[in-house]
Amino acid sequence: MDPRRSAHFMNDRPLPRSRRAARAHEAHESQFRLLGQRRFAPFFWTQFLGAMNDNVFKIGFTSLVTYQAARFSGVDPRTAAFLISAIFILPFVLFSATSGQIADKYDKALLTRLVKTFEIAVMLIGGAGFWLHSAPLLYLCTFLMGVHSTVFGPVKYSYLPQHLSNAELVGGNGMVEMGTFVAILVGTIVGGAGAGFAEHGALVLACACIAIALTGRAVSGFVPATPAPQPELRINWNPVSETWRNLKLARENRTVFLSLLGISWLWFVGATFLASFFSFAKDVLSADPDVVTVLLATFSIGIGVGSLLCERLSKRRIEIGLVPLGSIGMSVFAIDLFFASHALPPAGHLLSVGEFLARSVHWRVLADLFLLAMFGGFYSVPLYALIQSRSQPSHRARIIAANNILNSLFMIVSALMAMGMTAAGFGIPAIFLVTALLNVVVAGYIYSLVPEFLLRFIAWLLVHTFYRIRLVHAERIPEEGAAVLVCNHVSFVDAIVIMAESPRPIRFVMDHRIFRSPFVGWLFRHAKAIPIAPAHEDPALLARAYDRCAQALADGELVCIFPEGKLTRTRELNPFRHGVSEIVKRTPAPVIPMALRGLWGSVFSRALDAHWPRPISKGVMSRLSLAVGEPIDPALATPEKLQQTVTELRGARK
């Protein structure tokens, strides 16, 4: 099945037209409305309580061994947080491949309830560990909670595409990411507060973990049935061979695989920061355990805000242009956090929350953490949505399992790097700086391998810097299958505007002279634009252009052509040429007419050619519109009809 078709599937069955229309209407409403629907709410609260319980346990355990190390024999408080993190993620390496198969083979609602039942048993072990101050029992519980999360991970992320439409995926993922980090915040507060009780902290933590596990199991009973996409699958119980098979499966789609690597890198960065907070608070900020809660709260709120903003910034579609924006912001504010940490005066004692917040220099630290996390939300949500939308439904859970394997490997490397640097005498700020610089290198490498991310970012940045765009019937651009887009040609940025507003990559047919420009040529070569020339200039290039258009349409891609062949100099449309007719004659495909309004008179148009340097008659954040017409049968798509249709779409506004 074409992965793009998963956008219109629920329970892996096609939605009727009326329901698709209803879902399209719903996609324009707030993402919070999902919390009132059974297809999302029970699942959301189940994963929320699971993430919360993870953190009540881990924060409580970490806080006790950091600030009350004497009660736990054989535990090094300097490296305990990194060790706990490594033990928690070890099951992801060992069992992710198996859990991915299980999630593809069985009903996800049933699996959810089984996992939550297992969580109760695990927390009984953890409660005993807290009560007895037994580090071995607590480490065992940490490992078993990792097993719990390993099994639930593929269920969690493959559940959403079966119950949400493509237009809802970004909002749904944003809600889940926001909920996860709010759960981390609440779990941090509960875990830190529980550990703060000098005499009865262990008992409080034990009771809290068991109570949350019981609540999660009760809520999971309301998760709706989610039929298995591949019930006939035979499970390979060999984790080594299946892990390798899952990674090979993920590599079949290069963009998906590199997106998996991108998410795994985010977990490397996030794990480094989150596991460092206790030592950072104690050794760098000279603060007590309550300040750790403030740091984690700031970080969690930042992730939540960034995740929720993704839907608005992406206009409720999968906008991978936000991913480079996120990685840039993460590096900038992680580097600034290093310098902010070196500007702190000595405290002389462990600061309380009130004393910490009373010092203005600490607000820079909090601002860096908040913004770093917010940009992390911009980075992660589009990547998760991209993986879900472009993975084959039949093995989507195994792709998620491959993601978990990579995540765990990256997080283990993160823990080992932090432990090694700590043992070598490096402080926490130095670990932050190294992580930020590595983020620059890794991000640059990934974007060089998949230029689509960088191209969408450039298009998104340019368009949203200069213009406020109103889309008219953008849903007429098909989410799947081949089509030829035709549009009037008003300015030098027409293609960039269309690229930024399309839900899918587009193959633009462009004048061959454009490719001579170093930057613009690089941009459109990497966008797989198709150079074309008139027959009297280069007949061979014209023939190759038609062949490449035919191949692109045969592959189910979108092809966009500007039939005028040149920018207008008079604000009126130039006569449409016969290129579109030649393209659809070779490979019949629907023709989608479009019209740009509002670009005439801008600095990018021909309106001001007589003046140089050009005054900007339409300034930054000017209004423009992209109107999309009804698809036209290829047999009826004559130049005359297309010009008439585009003229009507454009209307009086130029």
Image (cartoon, helix red, strand yellow):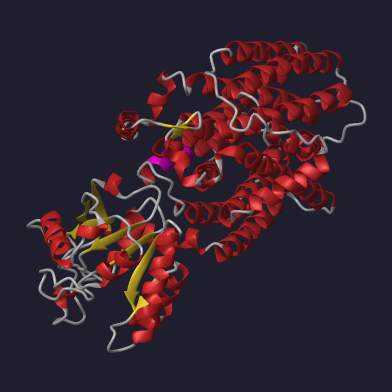
> Image quadrant of residue 619?
bottom left
Q: Residue 444 or 361: which is nearer the viewer?
A: 444
* Left or right placement of residue 371 versus residue 618 in this view: right
Q: Which residues are the magenta region?
A: 306-311
Residue 19 in percent (x, y) is at 34, 28
Residue depicted at 43% across the width and 22% down the height: 35
Answer above or below: position of 446 versus 240: below
Residue 511 in percent (x, y) is at 32, 78
Residue closest to the far right: 74
Asked if the magenta segment contains residue 309, the reply would be: yes
* Left or right placement of residue 312 versus residue 280 in this view: left
- Any part of residue 347 in sight: no
Q: Quadrant of the C terminus?
A: bottom left
Asked if the magenta segment contains residue 434, the reply would be: no
Q: How many marks?
A: 0
Answer above or below: position of 199 versus 398: above
Q: Residue 431 or 411: which is nearer the viewer?
A: 411
